[in-house]
Amino acid sequence: MADILPHLQPHIDRWKLSPDGKPFETHSSWLAPVTHGGKPALLKVFKPNSDETAAAIILRHWGDGACRVYEGDARAIVIERVEPGTSLVDMVETDDDRTTHIWCDVVETLHAKPAPEGWKDLRRCGRSLLDRPYPGHAVLTRELFERAQKEFRDLIETQGPRQHLLHSDLHHANVLNGGERGWLVIDPKGYAGELEFEASSFLHNPTRAYCAPKHLARRVHIVASRLGLDEERLIRWCFAHGVLSAVWSLEDDVFDPIGGIEAANAALQVLGHRIGG
């Protein structure tokens, strides 16, 4: 904890926060439960490698459906401590269909308005896949990598005209139960793009068991029906995003790349069944 406090203390001081729990650390941030004006809150200080530095802008843009922002800039953010704070992960085993419908409710609330002008686009999100050579790792074949490159490029170039400010990592653990306020989103990354991309990380989470083609196909059908999206593009984005996730894991050496590869292969199977009739 002694190593974490120097990163937190300047922000505790400048925003007049009161520590309210044990600080902790993730691969991309230093965090501490605090109070802000007497209200339970969470201080999150971004590490240099963080892709959440615009979180305050994004959460405020969304308003309803997102956690409240008390303070924030490109270095750190103070958000409400969402209570009771259980996530969609806690529901998925008992009722995956209901969980998927709740996720759709959240997306409808977040994306009722288009993205602001000048926001970074999905090409920036996919640069580890689009702008770099095949990493030459045994778990990721060149064939899968190059197909994902092609799919990602084609999907970007053929997006519809309506662009949304996407969370871009809207999996189950980033949707929390806020009690009377409903389900609330945390930890946005923020890219402008079509809604079909938003489902990518949700479709193959929270565990590798949900990468199975039967689970993926059912979720895709629900999401497409609820949100008026294109099923084939949902599946193609899931494939490309699965490979991108694997590439990120290989770059960072933090997470297991197998989950992303399994998601990509499941998407190819579902896509193959659709093409084959």
Image (spheres, rainbow, N blue to C red):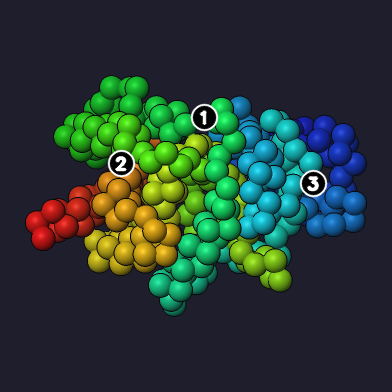
| Residue nearer the viewer, 272 or 171 | 272
Q: How many marks do you count on the picture?
A: 3
User: Could you tell me which secondary element the residue under label 2 belongs to?
Assistant: helix
Q: Earlier in the sequence, mark 1 or mark 3?
A: 3
Instruction: State the mark number for residue 240.
Output: 2
Q: Residue 73: image x %, image y %?
A: 73, 33
Identify the disc placed on residue 70.
Answer: 3
Q: Is the residue marked by circle 1 packed among few (<14), some (14-19), or many (20+) residues within 10 Å?
A: few
Q: Are marks 1 and 3 in contact (CB under 8 Å)?
A: no
Work out which residue is located at the far left of the displayed protein and give it: 276
Q: Looking at the figure, which quarter contains the C terminus?
A: bottom left
Question: Left of 170 or right of it: where is 132?
Answer: left
Q: Is residue 64 left or right of residue 199?
A: right
Quadrant of the image occupied by residue 249: top left
237 and 261: which is toward the camera: 237
Report x, y in % for residue 253: 42, 35
Inspect the image, locate mark 1, and give the three-letter code of the amino acid beneath it.
Lys
Q: Is residue 133 above or below residue 182?
A: above
Q: Is residue 104 above or below residue 59?
A: below
In this figure, which residue is indicated by the disc labeled 1? 120
Q: Is residue 27 above or below residue 40?
A: above
Question: Which numbered marker is on residue 261?
Answer: none
- The image position of residue 64, as x and y in percent, is 67, 56
Give the CA separation, mark 1 to mark 3: 24 Å
Residue at image point 57% right, 64% down: 87
Q: Nearer the viewer, residue 259 or 23?
A: 259
Ranked by sequence position, the earlier of labels 3 and 2 is 3
User: Label 3 is placed on what type of residue?
Assistant: Tyr
Q: Amino acid at mark 2?
A: Ala
Element carrying mark 1: loop
Residue 47 lies left or right of residue 102; in this view the side is right
Q: Residue 183: image x %, image y %?
A: 61, 64
